[in-house]
Amino acid sequence: MAIQQAAALYGQGRMHEAAEMAQRILKADPEYPDALHLLGLILYETGKAADGEKFIRQALDAARKKKTPVPASLWINLGNARRAQQKYSLAEKAYDEALKLDPRNQDACLERGILNQLCFDHDAALADFTKAIEIDPQRLSAYLRAAQSSVDAGRFRKALELCDIALARLDPPPAELTAFIGMVHERLSELDLAIEWTERALASGEANATALKSWAKASRRKFRKDTERLREIRSRLEAADFSQFEADNRRALYAELGLVCDDLGDADAAVEWFSRQNKASEEFGKTVGIDPESYVRQVDGLHDAFTPEFVASWSPVPGSGKRAAHRAAPVFLVGFPRSGTTLLDQIFDAHPDVQALEERPTLVALVENLRAKKAGYPGSLASLSEKERDRLSDLYYEEAERHGVDFTRHVVVDKMPLDLVHAGLIHRVFPDAKFIFALRHPAACVLSCFMQDFVPNASMLNFGSIERGARLYDKVMRLWGRYREVLPIEVQEVRYENLITDLRGEVEPALEFIGLGWDEAVSDPAAHARQRGSIRTPSYAQVTEPIYNRAAERWRRYEKYLEPALPLLKPHIERFGYSL
């Protein structure tokens, strides 16, 4: 049968041929459910999720019209196509339909669990993955998904418990599993165990990027001051065949090599590896259509819009956007990336009266709501009514509370460094909001951003070179300066260089600024970070260590690479009271 041949071609990965055969079938019978379904699946899997959804929905309609049974797989694939387009509520409905047809469909449980992970509903995700494990206790992916959802929620010990169950049931233990266990121990800063488990995975002889990355991280952290061991780590990584790894894993390994070379004092080699890391990020961005210039244009547009005349045109809006039952208006912890915001996040969160919200997109819905208005964003801020302002504050609180913060019991510190570009929006919606501004030497910030393996997005992809990072720094800080000129925002500055030498002297005024007194709990952020468990930013390894100052002046070892960027950075270096 032609449909079986088409399915066989699909199974062999011969997508183009399978699609052509499905199209020939549809010429003869435009409402052939299986051919519509297969074509939709191929389109989805080749990056055309919207077209894939369209054909899978047609398959569903055709099956209903012909009164033929609808398989659970059709609903699952429909859910996947919708999920790829971020149509999360519709995707959930599709997975639910699949489970109505087949309550013990493991694929439906796994895919719905992935959806819940994306929506940060960690409890629901774990429930789905746990059910998938019950359906088939021999399926490794179910254990790994369940363990990853626990890691996402900061429940590292729970993740290890799930791995222990898998170890007891899967004999011999797969290298993927032992690599994952090593990764969790590295995240917990249990470096000896991390090295032991990742070495076990690597001994299998399989190409395992997770094992190699986690082994490199744990080994580098453990032997940071041991030159001989660092050289061994470097040699082992350089001997690896990177071509067998996917692009994101190659990028992470380049980053590790850069950090090892930095620890060895080999600045030239470090820059070479970090350049490769950033080139891999840029290539990924191009593949998925991320435009870093769109972020630059947004920053420029906000700078140009926020003139004194624009702010003077704002209609009066009574109230503060703060709910009556809340302890305080939100506090926004902002700054350029790599300026010490993760360390400050841990310090504030250690205070018994503070709850820190770590890098969640709390402002996205507000920006999108304003962009949809006739005057766009930021233009529509001028004519904002009290009702519209309250709707925006509701959107903010809904997103923040979805991540477990309690505004009634705590002063909530919302940490998202580059939310400083939306300080005008924040002030318009929450005029009582306060800002903690994390500051670090501009050259150190830009260099550290160039060296960091960020998740590629429109803002982070501007760190592909030191010069481009300096350009973004200049634009962001000029925008921040504009906000300070035209808006009466309340700001407390915290300098990284002071923070690492006199924590109390720098933090106590910031606590007083947000209405709190000193508490001894904030004096050991490393202990709090280890106890807290969940640190989502790339700085997790640093903040679980005692405060150190080795990075404060690191940029001076890279001065020849920073030299082309200094004309852009010099005005900010001088304005913030630093020196070259």
Image: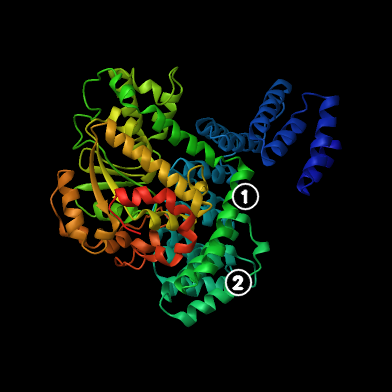
Check disc 2 and give the amino acid type. Answer: Glu
Is 488 on the left-hand or right-hand side of 25? left
Name of the residue lying farthest toward the left: 517
Depth check: give the residue in front, 580 or 194. 580
Identify the residue at horizontal 49%, vertical 45% (top origin): 128
Residue 367 visible to the viewer:
yes
Identify the residue at horizontal 42%, vertical 26% (top origin): 377
Depicted 532 relative to depicted 206: above or below: above
Q: Position of residue 472 (x, y in %)?
A: 45, 45
Depth check: give the residue in front, 121 or 273. 273
Quarter location, residue 102? top right
Instruction: Give the residue at mark 2.
Output: 238
Which label was assigned to residue 272?
A: none
Residue 155 visible to the viewer:
no
Quarter location, residue 289? top right
Mark 2: few/some/many CA within 10 Å (<14, 14-19, 20+): few
Q: Position of residue 179 (x, y in %)?
A: 53, 66
Quarter location, residue 191? bottom left
Is 10 on the left-hand or right-hand side of 261? right
Depicted 29 relative to depicted 105: above or below: above
Instruction: Give the residue at mark 1.
Output: 283
Check disc 1 and give the amino acid type. Answer: Glu
| Lower position in the chain sequence, tag 2 or tag 1 | 2
Q: Which quadrant: the C terminus?
A: bottom left
The span from disc 2 to disc 1 (Cα, nearest Å) is: 21 Å
Depth check: give the residue in front, 242 or 420. 420
Depicted 225 relative to depicted 405: above or below: below
Is 536 on the left-hand or right-hand side of 213? left
**What is the secondary structure assignment of the residue under circle 1?**
helix
Identify the residue at horizontal 40%, vertical 70% (top origin): 190
Q: Position of residue 313 (x, y in %)?
A: 30, 18
Identify the residue at horizontal 37%, vertical 55% (top origin): 534
